[in-house]
């Protein structure tokens, strides 16, 4: 996973612009989360449920304003891949995903992390940390 100013998937490849940052302004700032998965051979043609949650430095899910009130900042997605013709049996299958996060403000001078769960499982290496700049 990597944070970027913009990311898109085309023909199975990730195209990333302004990627690799870990500090953003506190004001409303759009961001993209670019991800590359190695899907195991035996998971082909089966849906994989993904959930990204934005967590603050105290371990709480960050809420953001919506027309129906404050809501947890989380993004759900479903990933499903098929085995490409000619793939060596047992080989993992590449899957790329680019998720755009709408612009919203976060408190200045704080740390946050996007935490990924795959089919309800989480791992420490599925965490993407960033900070907001202190205001001048």
Image (cartoon, rainbow, N blue to C red):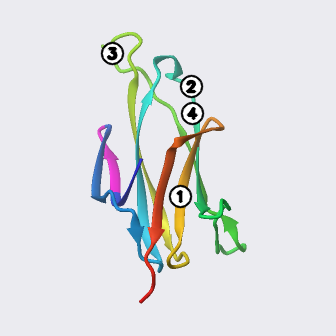
Which numbered disc, 2 or 1, marks the residue closer to the eye?
Answer: 1
User: Pointer 4: residues within 10 angstroms few (<14), some, or many (20+)?
Assistant: some
Q: Which residues are magenta?
A: 7-11
Which numbered disc, 1 or 3, marks the residue closer to the eye?
Answer: 1
Which numbered disc, 4 or 1, marks the residue closer to the eye?
Answer: 1
> Label 4 to label 1, Cα distance in Å?
22 Å
Q: Give whichever of 20, 94 is nearer the camera.
A: 20
Q: Earlier in the sequence, mark 1 or mark 3?
A: 3
Q: Confirm or deny contact between disc 2 and disc 4 (CB under 8 A).
A: yes
Q: Earlier in the sequence, mark 2 or mark 3?
A: 2
Per the image, the residue denoted by label 2 is 46
Q: Is residue 118 above or below residue 66?
A: above
Task: Kindly identify which numbered label has been placed on residue 48.
Answer: 4
Q: Earlier in the sequence, mark 2 or mark 1?
A: 2
Assign a secondary structure to mark 2.
loop
Residue at the spot x=46%, y=68% of the render?
Answer: 131
Q: Earlier in the sequence, mark 3 or mark 4?
A: 4
Q: Give whichever of 103, 134 is nearer the camera.
A: 134
Residue 45 lies in the magenta stretch: no
Per the image, the residue denoted by label 3 is 87
Per the image, the residue denoted by label 1 is 113
Q: Main secondary structure of the magenta part?
A: strand
Residue at the spot x=44%, y=24% of the render?
Answer: 82
Q: Is residue 53 above or below residue 38?
A: below
> Label 2 to label 4, Cα distance in Å?
6 Å
């Amino acid at each position: 996973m990597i944070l970027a100013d913009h990311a898109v998937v085309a023909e199975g490849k990730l195209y990333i612009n302004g990627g690799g940052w870990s500090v953003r302004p506190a004001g409303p700032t759009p961001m993209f989360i670019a991800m590359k998965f190695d899907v195991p051979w035996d998971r082909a043609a089966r849906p994989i449920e993904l959930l990204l949650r934005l967590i603050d430095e105290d371990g709480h899910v960050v809420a953001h304003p919506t027309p129906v009130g404050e809501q947890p900042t989380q993004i759900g997605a479903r990933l499903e891949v098929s085995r490409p013709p000619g793939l060596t049996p047992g080989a993992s299958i590449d899957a790329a995903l680019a998720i755009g996060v709408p612009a919203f403000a976060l408190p200045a001078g704080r740390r946050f992390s996007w935490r990924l769960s795959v089919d309800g499982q989480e791992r420490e290496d599925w965490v993407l940390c960033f900070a907001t700049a202190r205001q001048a």
